[in-house]
Image (cartoon, rainbow, N blue to C red):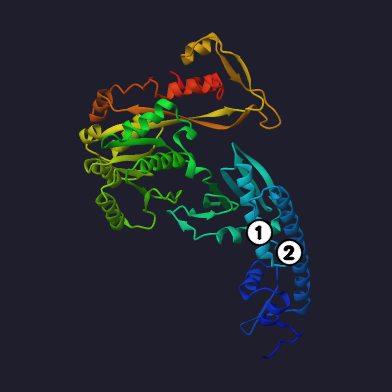
Amino acid sequence: MDRPEGGHISLDEAVEMLGLSRPEIYRRVLDKTLKGEKIDRRLWFPPDEVRRYAGELEKDRRLLREVVEKWLSFFAGKLEKQSWAVMTDVSGNDTGEQVAEIGERVLQDALRAGARDVHLDPLHEGMRLLYNVGRCREVARFEACLREPLVAWLTGLTDLKEGGTSGIREDMLSRSWVEPACQMRLTEIPTALGSHFHIHLFTGCENSSLENLGYTSDQTKRIRQDFVSRPGLILQIGSGTPEDDRNRITMAREWAESGRLVVCVDHRTGFRAEQLIQLDLRDTGESNAEELWRTAFRMSPNVLVVDDVRDAAEARALVEGVRGGAVVLAQVSAANLQDALRKLAEFEIDATALGRAFLGAVEKAVVRRLCTECSRRRPISPDEAERIGIEEGIQVGMAVGCQACGDGFSGSRQVYGLWTAGTEIATWIAGSRDCPPRPPDGPESLTAALRKAVRDGEATPDEVIAFFP
């Protein structure tokens, strides 16, 4: 190879001297952080430029080593008292393996803290780490030099798959530090500053019950017995949050444990339960999706669970499943039962068939949960008692605020209400839309569950009062 005048350094020599791959060098030349020259269609570098950049790289690598050591020590300190924690000595390993160990310690620390969600959020310089333990709180702020290695670790954890045209990718992974193994859903979300990573931990989902989710005893009895006593359509009204997923899976798992065959049709990755037959719609085209539905019907399930109703074909499949003798539990993204039924009607389902199939619905409210460390009791006011429909003179909770919570509240409380089939709802579904069905106010209703949350000191009267007309 003829070397240009001035003793220029070739690309291969630069690879060896800088410890970078050819693509990495090309990228740095394009970014103009490393100056190179095209001579006779080959890339050459002035010796002084390569020496300058080698010095910068060594400085960056030294800084990265210091940062990695700091965060390894930080999370080791948080996990040292956890007998189940698994920490690997990576002191002699390469930087990529050390950053991966930081990531594994982050996940274990989130589990230790009782976090349901972990967020790694991009910044202009670096990345911040947040845990959702009732509320989102910043746990750490990683330096800029750690951002790219952390992204490489995250995207290498599992085979992230796109779920549509938005660029969002997600998949499941699990870790067996504790028994049963902790399942997690990793979602990569494009943002203006780069990829935001959300990890939802399905902690406790394997052993969760309707009582754990916040259902009252009257509601759990209805769900466990009457909701599956005959074929029919049950609507779960929500927005597709992880808590909605947990709710749906818990109901399905309890029905399966009672001896029923439960088949789930899922549009997105979710918790994998041994008791359930779970079919994945993510990678199927229109014709394959139809065949997957047919496969579900041919299994003759007692219960068919659908995580989202997205089009007319799927809406018709709900009624078809009921006709086949199944209880169909379907999530519909809506504000309330009336909106959910209107949405199904827009998919041109036969109104008479829909009214005949309707068995019940589960609606949800989310209220702030009072902090158990600092909340105090006070007598309910006459106005509050009248508005909520609760007895006067009882003691109710009030927010105080402490170091643990800040404002008197600690996370949120899911409150559920059940609708059941009746002539009024069937008539409204069939086409008499002038007078919407009145919300129930019996022992299984949302209002009854909200009153219980107030009596139990979990929610304040002013927190629930908006739900009462």
Q: Position of residue 375 (x, y in %)?
A: 64, 23
Name which residue lies at 63% across and 69% down: 27
Residue 432 visible to an observer of this rendering: no
Query: Crowdedness of circle 2 by 10 Å Cα count: few (<14), some, many (20+)?
Result: few
- Residue kind at label 2, given as amino acid type: Ser
Q: Is residue 38 positioned above or below 58 on the image?
A: below
Name which residue lies at 23% across and 41% down: 325
Q: Which residue is mark 1?
A: 101
Q: Nearer the viewer, residue 466 or 27?
A: 466
- Residue kind at label 1, given as amino acid type: Glu
Say what secondary structure mark 2 lies in.
loop
Can you say which quadrant of the picture contains the N terminus?
A: bottom right
* Side of 258 where 123 appears, left or right: right
Q: Position of residue 72 (x, y in %)?
A: 72, 56
| Extreme residue in the bottom direction | 2
Q: Which residue is mark 2?
A: 91
Q: Nearer the viewer, residue 217 or 12?
A: 217
Q: Position of residue 37 (x, y in %)?
A: 68, 78
Q: Of the residues under marks 1 and 2, which one precedes in the sequence?
A: 2
Say what secondary structure mark 1 lies in.
helix
Q: Quadrant of residue 284?
A: bottom left
Residue 293 visible to an observer of this rendering: yes
* Side of 163 where 37 appears, left or right: right
Query: Crowdedness of circle 1 by 10 Å Cα count: few (<14), some, many (20+)?
Result: many
* Side of 198 where 362 appears, left or right: left
Q: How many marks?
A: 2
Cα gap from disc 1 to disc 2, whole angstroms: 10 Å
Q: Position of residue 444 (x, y in %)?
A: 39, 24
Q: Nearer the viewer, residue 434 or 130?
A: 130
Name which residue lies at 33% across and 43% down: 259
Q: Quadrant of residue 377?
A: top right
| Disc number for residue 400 | none
